[in-house]
Amino acid sequence: MIDSSPLVSIIMNCYNSDRFLKEAIDSVYAQTYSKWEIVFWDNFSTDKSPQIARSYDEKLKYNCGEQTVPLGAARNLALKKATGKYIAFLDCDDLFLPEKLERQVELMENENCVLSYGSIIVIDENGSTIRKNRMKNHGGFIFDKLLTKYEINMQSVMVRRSIIDEKKLEFNPNLGYSPDYNLFMEIASRYPIGVMDDYIVKYRVLSDSLSRKSLHLVSKEIEYTLNNILSRDPRLKLKYPQAFRSAFRKLNYYNAIDMINREEFKEARKELLDIILCSPKYLILYILTFLGFSKKTILRLIRR
């Protein structure tokens, strides 16, 4: 256990999340690290979430908005209430493993990094393990690696609050799908990142597929984030040309998947045409659109 224990503020944003809420909060109270607070932001829930949250002691600081706002805006409201040296995040259907905070605070203190993340266990609605995602990256300046393969799960993140305050960083309230990607990639483009090999979080999957709307948002919002970072520092594209090419290719892929969902196979092929030689996965998807399969069959085959 760390002797000099900095306070960790755990941001929990809630909107009608009573199904798994008690289990999520209990996972914080079960931590081996004791110096923490939960900043609980109720986004005007109408279920039993408020009663559940208010049943805990003063370490859970309950706040309720006057109206429901987008998730990014709700996270920013909660951040303003945080008083800890470090910020962690926990959604209401996920779980911290018992040593999550202890190990992560130790990493943050010893390596003096501004943000860290770790490996996760993916579980289903019943809590059964689906798979284990061990992080591939090592710590340091890994912005280019995250461009190629983004692996940060928000529940595993811990960030130094002073960076948020000093640089006036926040979750973009206008991004419906990826305000976390936007913020964490902005930080990664400027600072070294700590990566934990340890499994520290259980991340619950309630649906194994993206909706048509979210697929569209993925593409648009990733493009927005990349262009925003490049407008701030154009030198990054010269420094990491291959990584940026890989990131922009994924936009074509996401657009193609979105079009296949809408059974616009000809338009999907146009998106894939520029990237089919870059990956066997892109080439296979391109060929499948010619073979008369249904969209469900194509998407099932490409996920294998």
Image (tube, rainbow, N blue to C red):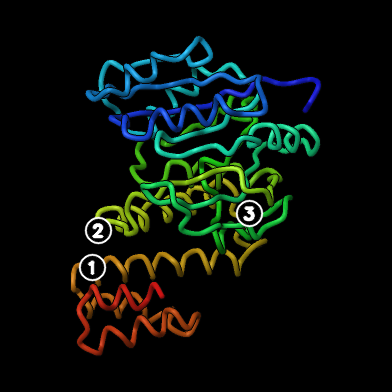
Give the secondary structure at mark 1: helix
Q: Position of residue 94 (x, y in %)?
A: 45, 39
Q: Where is residue 164 in the image (x, y as percent from the top left)?
A: 58, 29
Does 78 sit left or right of 290 as displayed? right
Does 26 sit left or right of 237 as displayed? left
Cα gap from disc 1 to disc 3, whole angstroms: 31 Å
Q: Are marks 1 and 2 in contact (CB under 8 Å)?
A: yes
Q: Position of residue 293 (x, y in %)?
A: 22, 83
Q: Please state which amino acid type lies under the numbered disc 1.
A: Asn
Q: On the image, numbered disc 2 is attached to which residue?
A: 212
Q: Which residue is drawn at 67% across and 54% down?
A: 142
Cα gap from disc 3 to disc 2, whole angstroms: 28 Å
Q: Residue 261 carries which label?
A: 1
Which quarter of the rendering shows the C terminus? bottom left
The reply to whether residue 226 is in sight is: yes
Residue closest to the eye, 67 or 243: 67
Based on the displayed image, in which of its 4 quarters is residue 104 positioned?
top right
Give the secondary structure at mark 3: helix
Cα gap from disc 1 to disc 2, whole angstroms: 7 Å
Counting residues from the start of the chain, the first of labels 3 and 2 encountered is 3
Residue 66's place in the image compared with 223, above or below, is above
Residue 273's place in the image compared with 110, above or below, is below
Numbered disc in front, either 3 or 2: 2
Q: Position of residue 32 (x, y in %)?
A: 66, 28
Which quarter of the rendering shows the N terminus? top right
Q: Please state which amino acid type lies under the numbered disc 2.
A: Arg
Q: Do the residues labelled 3 and 2 touch (CB within 8 Å)?
A: no
